[in-house]
Amino acid sequence: MKPAARLATLIEIIDEIEETHLAGYGLRKGLQRRRYAGSGDRQAISAMFWQVHRAWARLFWHLQQCGCQVTARSISIAALMLVNRQLPAAISALFGGDDKHNAAALSADELELVAQLVDRQLDHPEMPRNVALEWPEFLMADAIAALGESADAELLALRGEAATDVRINPLKIDDRRVLREKFAGRGLKCHLNTLSPIGIRLEKRNRTENFPEWKKGLFEYQDEGSQIAALLCDARPGMQVVDMCAGAGGKALVMAAQMQNRGRVLALDSDAERLERGGERMRRAGAHNIERKHVGDSWGTKRWRGKFDRVVIDAPCSGSGTWRRQVDARWRCSSDDLARYTSLQAQLLDKGRAMVVPGGRIIYITCSVLASEGAQQIDRLLAEAPELELADIGEIWQDTIGKQQGGACPTLDRGMLRLLPGRDGTDGFFIAVLQALLR
């Protein structure tokens, strides 16, 4: 496909995406319907697509300033000028012409838009703060409450692209440098993660389904922050561990390896399909001490009261710490959504309080950079639970990650850990560990 045909396809795909669908889903479906596009075309269209979405609020603002209606064509034109810095003549050449695959020629209004955008810069000093940061306005105060003076730097980092990390499976390989060398031998550029002692960062994501190391379960894809959260659970051989929101089992697999397949990890989730997907991962990894159990949305704790040494709550949340990956999810999150998440988080913490054994720990994790989904939840629980106290993650870090020669623990807040994309190069995570006192 020529550049003009690629642009026309981009405009069509943006226009086709339904309001109920995430952008990534719409892109995949759009490319599936266009099987004639080669791999190079798909990569180019995808790159342009995400350029538009990573600058969506700023492009929208510029179009409003120009008095232009926001359409798939107008926002693509704005991206060409303000993100790619293409000149008016080059943009005009991408529209119209004799090729039937090209988008229609620029209209008079679109030519006027091009003229208005010539001297503009994508980042403009008159933009509202939340627009410049590509952040929902109603979440600004919540993010600032969590991030403080680093809020702007971290929210700017969330405008960028996420890294691609993998982690070794300690049940089958004990030195990540061995896997790194195997990747390097295939021409994959990568380096060891700086914080996680079991992680490797790839320069770009590659298809690994045919790699013998993948088939043998030597590694899994997992963000470095998620690896750290799982390691800080400090699951040990012989323990009884419950993963209350296990999903497809990413953290459960790390804990099973820490436990050397001894003891039990009870993986609970209300999504049966996600649990089923986790079964294949567990078989490939050789993790034999994970028990999967589907639970309803309103499951109770009666049968599990005071049973677990580790209660892991990887709670459903806004996902704001992962919005580099699901770029448009930030625009789909509403105040009602956040209220529903925070209510569910509080319920899960209360269940964890009932399920932990005296002397055990509750590990609360969210992939969020919002105060309402992090420290505020912990403060609420501690005010109601005199049998719990806040553990110092710095000490747990030394006993787990430090002993495995991981990086130094980032700065803590009252013993709680926030992992950040700008400072730490990970997805945004909040992690707190609550110690149940011996009665």
Image (cartoon, rainbow, N blue to C red):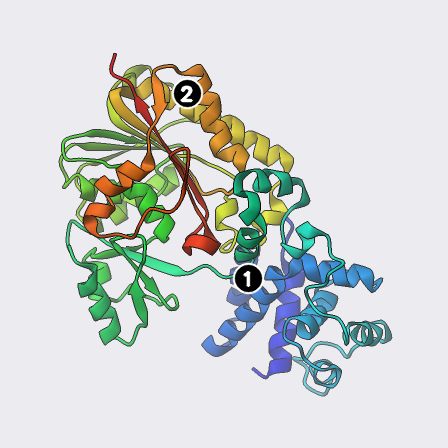
> Residue 138 location in percent, x, y?
66, 40
> Residue 329 location in percent, x, y?
57, 49
For the N terminus, the image quarter is: bottom right
250 is higher (above) or lower (below) than 33: above
316 is higher (above) or lower (below) than 356: below
Q: What amino acid type should be assigned to the residue bearing mark 1?
A: Leu
> Is residue 221 left or right of 59 when viewed as pictured?
left
The crowd level at tag 1 (other Cα within 10 Å; few <14, some 14-19, many 20+) is many
| Residue nearest the observer in this picture, 390 or 272 | 390
Q: Label 1: state its secondary structure.
A: helix
Cα–Cα span, label 1 and label 2: 40 Å
| Residue 344 is at least partly visible in this image | yes
The crowd level at tag 2 (other Cα within 10 Å; few <14, some 14-19, many 20+) is some
Identify the residue position indicated by label 2 in the image: 350
> Residue 377 location in percent, x, y?
48, 28
Image point 63% across, 43% down: which residue?
A: 140
| Figure quadrant of residue 235 | top left
Image point 70% across, 76% down: which residue?
A: 103
> Is residue 217 left or right of 117 when viewed as pictured?
left
For the C terminus, the image quarter is: top left
Identify the residue position indicated by label 1 in the image: 27
Image point 33% across, 29% down: which residue?
A: 391
Q: What amino acid type should be assigned to the residue bearing mark 2?
A: Asp
> Residue 309 location in percent, x, y?
24, 26
| Residue nearest the observer in this picture, 249 or 231 | 231
> Is residue 1 left or right of 349 when viewed as pictured?
right
| Residue 298 is at least partly visible in this image | no
> Is residue 173 left or right of 93 when viewed as pictured?
left
